[in-house]
Image (spheres, rainbow, N blue to C red):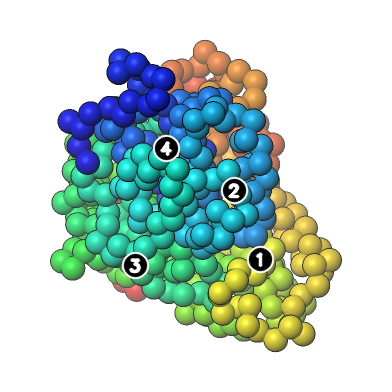
Amino acid sequence: MTGTEPAITLGGMSPTERPTVYVETYGCQMNASDSELMLGTFAARGYTPVDRPDGADVILVNTCAIREHAEQRVFGRLGELKRHMARDTILGVTGCMAQRLGADLLRRAPHVSLVVGPDGYRALPALVDGARAGARAVDTAFHPDEHYEDVRPRRAAGVKAWIPVQRGCDYRCTYCIVPTTRGPERSRRLADVVQEVRDAVAAGMTEVVLLGQTVNSYHDGTADFAALLRAVGAVPGLRRLRFTSPHPNDFSTRVLAAMADTAAVCEHVHLPMQSGSTRTLRRMLRRYTREEYLRCVDRLRTAIPGLALTTDVIVGFPGETDEDFQETLSAVDVVGFDDAYTFKFSPRAGTPATRLPAEETVPDDVASGRLTELIAAVRRRGRARNVQLLGTRHEVLVEKRARRGDALQARTRDFKTVLLGPDAAAVGQYCTVALTGTTGSTFTGVVVDSGAARRRTALPLAAG
């Protein structure tokens, strides 16, 4: 669809009025990026995006299916949205939960008219037209060639752009629903990614985040992830380059060299570990051992000294013993993660983990106890490291106003959050700050140089 198509005219609405669309997003950065695609699709048809659901002509809830709690939260929200709907409002559910539940979602939420999976967003405006005529629709077909290259995303105002480079996943970890909800792995063409980065920079965004389920396994048939990093990093005006989420198995020597050589690549990697026990990792089908993960950490830190690492960890996976959990705590200590996203195992229907023997289920109280202990360990070690940084200076990018109070929220290149005074700088500005305090997870700081332009000097890559 193109921007030349006529705007939709709704019943009782004059041709000069533009219909409105509201998208509410749950889940990961890929979902946030998909919401921007949806808004772009509707904008090309004459819709105006709004930031509240009240009376919107179209309300879409873009969903996550990674854990059961996320789905239950969405069902609760769908009930709440009834009171925000006007008589002619069309309510749709998109994303991974829509893909997983399909037509069953229409049955469980009768006021929902559309259920559309991640490969069906191009058809949304037409499906809305059909819903206005009384048709309820489900579109959960996979389209392996769909990358929405001709859809201009409607990005939220900000300083960074989320740019998908890969969709789907071929790893098939036993606990993960993603291969079911997003299909097989496929990569965009390097030239298309670079052009989108150029467009984002031209729109004033100086930081981009490359997205993929296992982003460093990117390959478009000719170019690998190393080539992508170098090409994106060479875009004039780009100052910061991040990516998420990589797989430990796909940090080749070429990728490490590209990270070290490309000045825009930030000194932070989110490296999912999931467990520190080789026995549990094998049952998860993560395809690496504890020792291989730790070697990956060493290689990354050799390539980029001072690298900050964050991670994902699951506790209570079926069959996890006290000894397995202690190995996870040990790995957290050995690596010294800057932060971690921690979760209790959540069984998802259709994944191999649900077929493990029932007697291997970890009792909820045991899993909850392990999660509490893990969170405390991560916070304790993180706070100890952060206290040592007080008084040091860092380049930050001021990203936005903080959610609470009147502070500004800024981010260092190694992904630490720094809160500044309300008049310390402008959103989008780079400056150098001195860290003055820490809560353990975030910092306070003062601006000491408002014209920061530090760039990391490329370092030689050690063999390995």
- Image point 32% across, 59% down: which residue? 166
Disc 3 versus disc 2: distance between alpha carbons? 33 Å
Q: Name the residue under label 1.
A: 346
- Toward the front, the furthest residue is 133
> Which tag is nearer the camera, tag 3 or tag 2?
2
Disc 3 versus disc 1: distance between alpha carbons? 23 Å
Tag 2, which secondary structure? loop
Residue 260: horizontal and vertical position, in percent? 31, 55
Q: Which of marks 3 and 2 is nearer the N terminus?
A: 2
Q: Is residue 215 left or right of residue 59?
A: left
Q: Quadrant of the N terminus?
A: top left
Residue 126 appears in view: yes
Disc 4 versus disc 1: distance between alpha carbons? 37 Å
Disc 1 versus disc 2: distance between alpha carbons? 27 Å
> Which tag is nearer the camera, tag 1 or tag 2?
2
Q: Are marks 3 and 1 in contact (CB under 8 Å)?
A: no
Q: Is residue 6 left or right of residue 367?
A: left
Towards the viewer: 133 or 162? 133
Eyeballing the image, is 296 above or below 320? Answer: above
Tag 3, which secondary structure? loop
Residue 217: horizontal and vertical position, in percent? 33, 67
Disc 3 versus disc 4: distance between alpha carbons? 35 Å
Q: Earlier in the sequence, mark 1 or mark 2?
A: 2
The amino acid beneath tag 2 is Pro
Disc 1 residue crowd, few under 14, some 14–19, many 20+, Cα 10 Å: some
> Which tag is nearer the camera, tag 3 or tag 4?
4
